[in-house]
Image: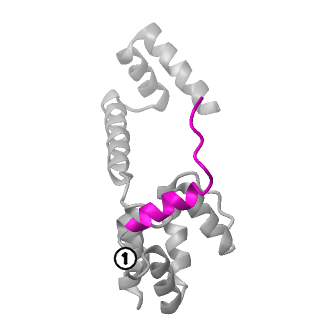
């Protein structure tokens, strides 16, 4: 909260006196030169832009790869990472939350992209058989993606479809 007040006060000073006068006053208050103040500002803005570049969103696969790279079950986990990214595994945030809750993790994630790490930490602890079973549930043998989609649609609309009146 104090940071906001400081920013407001500085903006008011800049509006009232201008950038140069405020920087000169800051240099005098800090007992440094105007050039040193300007250099500090450049370093701070460079740091912010480099942080912004490093904070660019990583894909689900990239995030999962860091966790699963040395696992003996790498191929199975990688397949789940691909399916997580293309939303055929835990397609919604609520699905990821329910998955984590079923495994005793009550972490409140607000984005599906943030849930990748805890989901794959859980998956990393599972056996090869459990992972194979999970993949088999996602894509049962002998069914195409189209037939799975059709079954899912039919499964969600079991009752008669009401026509709008």
Any magenta on residue 24? Answer: no
What residue is drawn where x is 48% and y is 18%? 11
The percent coordinates of residue 53 (x first, y second) are 32, 49
What residue is drawn where x is 35% and y is 51%? 56
Residue 69, compared with residue 62, is above or below; it is below
Binning the other alpha carbons within 10 Å of mark 1 as few (below 14), some (14 to 19) or many (20 upward) gives: some
Q: In which quarter of the image is residue 157?
A: bottom right
Q: Is residue 130 visible?
A: yes
For mark 1, what is the residue? 79
Give the structural element (helix, strand or loop) at label 1: helix
Residue 104, compared with residue 56, is above or below; it is below
Quadrant location of the C terminus? top right
The percent coordinates of residue 83 (x first, y second) are 39, 68
Q: Is residue 70 visible?
A: no
- Between 122 and 1, the one nearer to me in the picture: 122
Quadrant location of the N terminus? top right
- Between 116 and 46, the one nearer to me in the picture: 116
- Between 131 and 70, the one nearer to me in the picture: 131
The percent coordinates of residue 22 (x first, y second) are 43, 18
- Between 3 and 67, the one nearer to me in the picture: 67
Please state the total of marks drawn on the protein image.
Answer: 1
Position of 54 compared to 123: left or right? left
- Name the colour scheme: one colour
Q: What stretch is highlighted in magenta?
A: 147-165
Residue 62, compared with residue 35, is above or below; it is below
The percent coordinates of residue 129 (x first, y second) are 50, 91
Q: Which residue lies furthest to the top in this view?
A: 16
What residue is drawn where x is 56% and y is 37%? 163
């Amino acid at each position: 909260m104090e940071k906001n007040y400081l920013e407001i006060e500085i903006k008011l000073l800049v509006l009232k006196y201008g950038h140069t006068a405020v920087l000169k006053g800051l240099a005098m208050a800090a007992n440094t030169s105007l050039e040193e103040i300007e250099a500090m500002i450049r370093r701070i803005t460079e740091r912010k832009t480099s942080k912004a570049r490093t904070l660019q969103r990583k894909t689900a696969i990239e995030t999962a790869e860091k966790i699963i790279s040395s696992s003996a079950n790498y191929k199975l986990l990688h397949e789940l990472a691909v399916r997580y990214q293309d939303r055929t595994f835990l397609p919604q945030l609520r699905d990821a939350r329910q998955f984590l809750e079923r495994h005793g993790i009550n972490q409140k994630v607000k984005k599906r992209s943030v849930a990748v790490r805890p989901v794959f930490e859980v998956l990393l602890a599972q056996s090869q058989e459990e992972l194979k079973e999970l993949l088999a549930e996602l894509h049962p043998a002998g069914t195409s993606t189209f037939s799975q989609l059709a079954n899912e649609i039919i499964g969600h609309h079991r009752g008669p479809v009401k026509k709008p009146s």
